[in-house]
């Protein structure tokens, strides 16, 4: 088996550059593809507060829906940004793949839905994307049709690093990405930002911090420092 193409230098490009203007078209297309997966999950998975059941999760190769129930069966959809395919697997051993390549959202949507139907898992979703300007229904969208594998791979590597750090300090605050990647220690900068935003909220709201917090070690770059969670 041939190895997937590597788009990075493991030693020097842990936080790769991702200028939006260089991959805007691919970003817009990939955004629609992931919304299709999210809407399939929304249609089938049990409701969780704040729609947490719809989220995609970072994996060692891309993004996953995690297992989705379908009656007494289960399937999973994985965006693989190393070999660039959407892999659909079922708990009873079926495997199908849909290519991640320059193609329209409409084409991608039709193949994903027909693939699920071929597995005996047909599903209907609301085809209009959400939280975007001038939404085009998936089955009619021939405007978004770009896919640059290098930038998709970079996106995954960024998500991988962010997920790693955020799992140390769970939060939803935003810090400019370029500030993080250019820092001498991206991990320390991100953790310091998260700590400062937590403290601002905790002190303003007069939380009982002694009852809520515990200490945990930050990464090996600063072994003597601890933070409260």
Image (tube, rainbow, N blue to C red):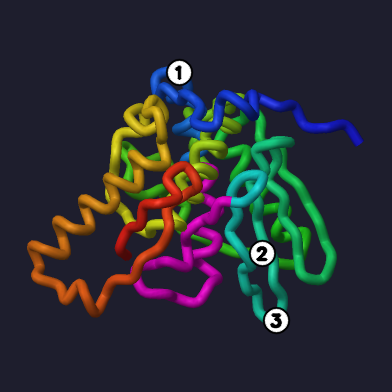
Whether residue 35 is visible to the viewer of this picture, yes or no, is no
Circle 3 sits on which residue? 72
Left or right, 98 with respect to 225, comes to right
Q: Is residue 114 above or below residue 50?
A: above
Circle 1 sits on which residue? 22
- Disc 2 versus disc 3: nearer the observer: 3
Circle 2 sits on which residue? 122
Who is closer to the viewer here, 202 or 48?
Answer: 202
| Residue 47 among those drawn in magenta | yes
Judged from this view, the residue extending furthest toward the right is: 1
Query: How packed is label 2: few (under 14 Cα within 10 Å), some, or many (20 or more)?
Result: few
Who is closer to the viewer here, 170 or 145?
Answer: 170
> Counting residues from the N terminus, which is met first, the one under dot 2 or under dot 1?
1
- Disc 3 versus disc 1: nearer the observer: 1
Q: Secondary structure at mark 2?
A: loop
Please state the horizontal and vertical placement of residue 41, each as a whole percent of the image. 54, 63
Query: How packed is label 3: few (under 14 Cα within 10 Å), some, or many (20 or more)?
Result: few
């Amino acid at each position: 088996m041939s190895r997937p193409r590597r788009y990075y230098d493991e030693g020097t490009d842990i936080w790769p550059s991702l200028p939006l203007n260089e991959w805007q078209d691919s970003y817009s297309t990939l955004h629609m593809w992931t919304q299709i997966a999210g809407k399939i999950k929304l249609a089938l998975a049990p409701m969780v507060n704040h729609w947490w059941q719809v989220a995609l999760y970072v994996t060692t190769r891309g993004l996953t829906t995690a297992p989705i129930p379908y009656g007494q069966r289960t399937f999973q959809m994985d965006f693989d940004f190393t070999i660039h395919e959407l892999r659909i697997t079922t708990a009873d051993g079926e495997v199908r793949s849909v290519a991640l390549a320059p193609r329209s959202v409409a084409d991608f949507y039709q193949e994903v839905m027909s693939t699920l139907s071929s597995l005996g898992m047909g599903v209907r979703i609301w085809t209009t994307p959400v939280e975007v300007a001038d939404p085009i229904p998936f089955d009619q969208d021939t405007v978004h049709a770009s896919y640059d594998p290098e930038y998709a791979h970079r996106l995954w590597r960024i998500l991988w690093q962010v997920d790693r750090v955020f799992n140390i300090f769970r939060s939803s605050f935003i810090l400019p990405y370029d500030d993080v990647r250019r820092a001498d220690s991206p991990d320390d900068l991100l953790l310091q930002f998260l700590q400062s935003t937590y403290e601002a909220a905790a002190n303003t709201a007069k939380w009982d911090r002694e009852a809520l917090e515990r200490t945990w070690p930050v990464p090996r770059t600063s072994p003597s420092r601890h933070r409260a969670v």
